[in-house]
Image: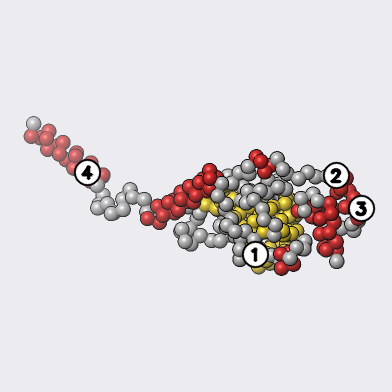
Amino acid sequence: MMATATSSDKINEERRKRVFLGTLPPDFLRISESTQLQQESADQQTAIALQQQMFGSSLVQNPTGRLNITVTNAKLVKNYGMTRMDPYVRIRVGHCVYETHTDPNGGKNPRWNKVIQCLVPPGVISMTVEIYDECSFTMDELIAWAVVPIPTSVLAGETHEDWYPLTGKQGEGLEGMINLVLSYSNVPVNPYFYPTQGVAPVMMVPSTATGSLYGISPYAPVQVYTQPTPASALQTVAQYNETDFKQIEEMFPNMDKEVIKSVYEANRFNKNAAVNSLLQMAE
């Protein structure tokens, strides 16, 4: 019996040696403070977004007016990846983010012809434009970006169309160019009324997967929460008129058709307003 007990003690001792390898660290099985702060911040921002959806509070306080941004197309210098890229555009105005649809297989020459209507907060004089390649199994890749100033002529009521240089892996201003058409109206509007395309503002939520809470790159992808557009606003969407568009085309035979279409959409399919804007651009 004594021999059996001694043998059992030896077996238990060997097991303890394999299990207890040393003193456990103080934070064993504890969530790190940095990760916890990131998650709490993300949860707080999401809660704010949901609260604003429920109670209809504005994401933009005391807007100065409405900026119409027509994202027509881009010319990129390189296609990153083994296949043709699927680019889309993300625009940041103040604290709101807006996105175009994805152009499948757009590659180096994506086209969107997307009209975005956004409210301009006081003091905002520029916007950030970013082009991403939509990926299926990995995080979307940032291809190019630019900080675009809002021209004073646009704030004065003129329509402005231009190509803006893009920055990326190739260097500053060397990644290609993007074509934008800008127009502005200082008429007070409902913060949730985006008539042309039903585009609603996007609530930014800090990413918990990239860097620290205060060290995230300004060009890092972020999770977003989209504020849905009320059904009442969608019912008042202006209608495209093919006859009016053809007449406008005939009046400007030397102007690119896509630019004419973009200006027509930016002016909410108002024929006279579109003609006036095109005349300003032709001067």
> Which residue matches tag 3?
250
Q: At 85% across and 63% down in the image, what residue appears? A: 282
Query: Mark 3 to mark 1: distance in Å?
Result: 34 Å
Q: Which residue type does callout 2 highlight?
A: Glu
Q: Which mark is residue 262?
A: none
Closest to the observer: 211 or 271?
Answer: 271
Closest to the observer: 10 or 137?
Answer: 137
Query: Mark 1 to mark 4: distance in Å?
Result: 65 Å
Number of numbered callouts drawn: 4
Q: Is residue 122 left or right of residue 50?
A: right
Q: Are marks 3 and 1 in contact (CB under 8 Å)?
A: no
> Which residue matches tag 4?
16
Q: Position of residue 185 (x, y in %)?
A: 72, 58
> Which residue matches tag 1?
126
Q: Is residue 87 left or right of residue 16?
A: right
Kind of element beneath mark 1: strand
> Which residue matches tag 2?
242
Q: Are marks 2 and 1 in contact (CB under 8 Å)?
A: no
Q: Position of residue 101 (x, y in %)?
A: 68, 47
Q: Earlier in the sequence, mark 3 or mark 1?
A: 1
Q: Are marks 3 and 2 in contact (CB under 8 Å)?
A: no
3 vs 4, front mark: 3
Q: Classify 10 Å Cα crowding around label 3: few (below 14), some (14-19), many (20 and above).
A: few
Q: Classify 10 Å Cα crowding around label 2: few (below 14), some (14-19), many (20 and above).
A: few
Q: Which residue type does callout 3 highlight?
A: Glu
Q: Position of residue 205 (x, y in %)?
A: 52, 52
Q: Earlier in the sequence, mark 2 or mark 1?
A: 1
Does residue 104 sit above or below 280 in this rendering? above
Q: Position of residue 168 (x, y in %)?
A: 64, 62
Residue at far top of view: 1
